[in-house]
Amino acid sequence: MVVGKMKLTFQKRVKLAQGLWLLSWVATLCGAITFTLGCFLKTELRRRTEVMDNTDIHCVPNTLLIVGLASMGSNYFAGRICQDALDAGRFPRWKNFLKPFYGGSIFFTTLMLIAVILSYVMKGSLESSLKIGLKNGIRFYKDTDTPGRCFQKQTIDRLQMEFQCCGNNDYKDWFEVQWISNRYLDFSSKEVKDRIKSNVDGRYLVDGVPFSCCNPRSPRPCIQYKITNNTAHYNYEHQTEELNIFIGGCREALVNYYMGLMNTIGGVVMSVFLIQSSVLATLRLLQTSMEAVAGQENVEMDAEGYLLEKGVKETVMEYLDPVLKLMWLNQVTSSEDTGTKDGNS
Amino acid sequence: MALLKLKFPFQKRVRLAQGLWLLSWVAVFSGAITFAVGVFLKTELHRRSEVMHNMDIHIVPNLLMAVGLASVGINICAGKVCQDSLDPSRFPRWKTFLPPFFCMSVFLASLLLVAMILSYALQPSLEESLKIGLKNGIRFYKDTDTPGRCFQKETIDRLQTEFQCCGNTNFRDWFEVQWISNRYLDFTSKEVKDRVRSNVDGRYLLDGVPFSCCNPASPRPCIQYSLLDNAAHYNYEYQSEELNLHNRGCRQALVNYYMGLMNTIGPGVLSVFLLQMTVLVSLRYLQTSMEGVMGQENLEIETEGYILEKGVKETLLETKEKVMKIFEFAQVGDASATTPGADPEAAAAPGPATK
C-alpha cells in the first residue's frame, strides 16, 4: 500500500537532486516574499487601528509572518539535504533529522493554507470591528480636548478624505451625533437653544457633515450644512445631488480595501503553498530512493522512491503514536499518584 | 609629456582587466538606476503639470533618462572591451572604435554633472512656472462648465488637500478671485447684489476659502466663510487662529517638495558620475598599456599606461586639426560636385583660401 511509488534511475536521481536544489532556493525566496507580505499587511492594519475595535484580524498577518520565516528555514535545510543526497558518505547523518523535519514542514505548509482560509473567514469579524470603531470615532469626533480622544477628529477627517467616504454606513450617521463641541456653540443664541431643546438628550444635532466629507469632484463649492434643506441653497436639490459629498460609508470602503489586499496576498500565498508542497514531495522521493541505495556497493543502480511507505492512515497513526503515548504517560502517572495517595490515607 | 603615466606589469594588467570587468557591470546597474530615477522624477513633474505654466524643468529628468540609457550601453561596451583586452588577437579590432568612444563617453558623463547643476539652477524657473500655473488654477476654479478648464477645481482641491497648502502665496489669494460660479449665486438676494456692486469688475468676492484649505488637525470644525469677521463665529479670533486652515501657500509647498526630491537625487547622480569616470579612466589605462604589448612576442612584459599621449593642450590642437581636415574634405567634395567644369587639380588640392 505504498503511496506515490516511482522508479528512479541514477541519472534521474541526479537531475532530481539538481532540480530540487534550485527549487529550494526559489522556495526560500518565496518564503521571504510571504514574510514581507505579512509585514505589509500588518502595517496596513496597524495604520487604521484607531477605527478598529479589536485586533482579531491580526491573526492573518501574524500567521503569514510565522509561516514565511519557517518556510525560509525549512527550504534552506531542504537545499542542504539535497546537496548531500548524492554523496553516500554524507547522506546518513540527516537520517534522524528527517522525520521531525517533515512533520514540522507539513505543519507549517498547512498553516499557509489556513492563513488564506482565515483571511476570508475573518471578513465578518473585521466588519463588526470596524462598525464599532467607526461609531466610536464619530461619537468622539468633537472631544478634541479630552485626553485619549483628542486625535479622533484628525483620524476620522484623514480617513474620510483618503478613502473618499463619509460616516459609518453613509453620511446620515453625522446627523445623529453631536459632532460640534459645546466649546464652539453660542448658548445665548436662539438657534442653538432651539436645536438643543428639540431632542431628549439635549444634543446639538445638525443636518450637516464635516468638511472631510466634501467631494473634490463636485462642480460647485461644497455644501456641508443644511444638506437636506433645498431652500437654504440656490439651485440645489439634495435628492438629485450626487457629487457634493461622498455617498459611501467608511466601513464598506475599508472592508473593500482590506479584502482586496487579502485577495491579492491570498493568491500569492497559494502559489507559494504549491511550490512548498512540491519541494517537500520531491525531497521525500529523493530521500527514499537514496535510502534504497545506501549500503549497496553499486551506487548507480536503479532505486524506487515513494512518498509514504504505508498508507496515509497508518502513517498518520505512526506520527501521532509518540504524541499520544506522551499524553497517556502523563495521565497514567497522575492517576497512579492519586491512587497511592488514596491507598496511603 | 604623457599625462599621468603609470607602469603596468603583467599581473597588474590582469587585475586591472578583472576589476574593470566587475566595475563595468556595477556601472551598468547604476546606469539603469539613473534611468529609473529620471523616469520617476518625470512622472512626478508630469502629475502636477496642470499647475505648471512651462515645462523648462523637465530638462533635468530628460537628461537623466538619456544619460542613464547611454551609460548602460557604454558600460556594456567597456565590459566587452576589457574581456577582449587580455587576448592580443581579439584586442586590435577595437582600435579604431576606442578614441571616439572615449570622447562620447566623457561627454555623456559630464551631462550628468550638467543635470545636477541644472536641478539647482532651474529652481527660480520652477517657482515662476508654479506661480503662474497656480494663479490660473485659482482663477479658473469656478469654471467647471467650461471645456478645457472643467477639471481645475478638482486639481486645485486635491493639490491643496495632498500638500496641505492653501492658495498661491497664502489663503488670502482666494479673497481676490471669484471662486464661486455665477450658476450657484442667487442674484435676487441682497447679499449677493451688495457684494457684486462693491467692486469695479462686478465679481462676487468674499472672505472665504474652499473646503480643501481646511486643516484636519484643527480642534474645531472648519471655518471656511467670513474668515475675517470675528463676530460671525463664536469664540473665534482670526488673528490668533493658526490651525483652522493650512497656513502655507501651495507654491512654497510644491517648490519644497520638488527641491527635496532633487536634493535626494543629487548625491546619487554624483556618485554615478564618479563611478562612470573611474570606469573610463581604468579602460583608458588598460587600452594604452595593452597597446604597448601589441606586436611583441613576450606578452608578459611590463608596459606603460597613460591617459593622454601628449599633454592636454597638444592633444586638443591635434584633435582640432583632425576635425578641420574632415571638414575641408567635405567642403572640397561639395565644391567639386557643384563646379564640374572647374580644374579638377585645383579643386582636389585643399587651399588655404577656402578656409
Image (tube, grey):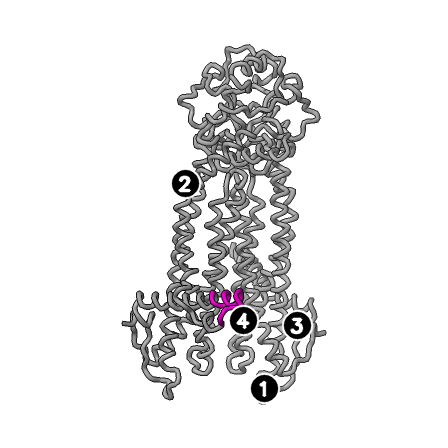
Question: The N terminus of chain A appears in which quarter of the rendering?
Answer: bottom right
The image position of residue B247, as x and y in percent, is 43, 30
Q: Which residues are magenta?
A: B331-343
Q: Chain of mark 2?
A: B
Q: Is residue B339 magenta?
A: yes
The image position of residue B196, as x and y in percent, is 55, 16
Q: Is residue B139 visible?
A: yes
Q: Chain of mark 1?
A: A
Left or right: where does residue B351 sit relative to residue A127?
left
Q: CA distance from mark 3 to mark 1?
A: 21 Å
Nearer to the camera, B193 or A315:
B193
The numbered mark at residue B124 is 2
Q: Amino acid at mark 3?
A: Leu
Q: Amino acid at mark 1?
A: Val
Q: Amino acid at mark 4?
A: Gly
User: Chief secondary structure of the magenta span?
Assistant: helix
Please name the residue that numbered disc 4 is placed on.
A79
Please name the residue that numbered disc 3 is placed on.
A307
Q: How many residues crowd mark 1 within 10 Å: few (<14), some (14–19), many (20+)?
A: some
Q: CA distance from mark 4 to mark 2?
A: 59 Å
What kind of element bears circle 3?
A: loop
Q: How many residues crowd mark 3 within 10 Å: few (<14), some (14–19), many (20+)?
A: many
Q: Chain of mark 4?
A: A
Disc 4 vs disc 1: Cβ atoms closer than 8 Å? no
Question: What residue is shown at x 55% (from left), y 43% (from top)?
Answer: A55
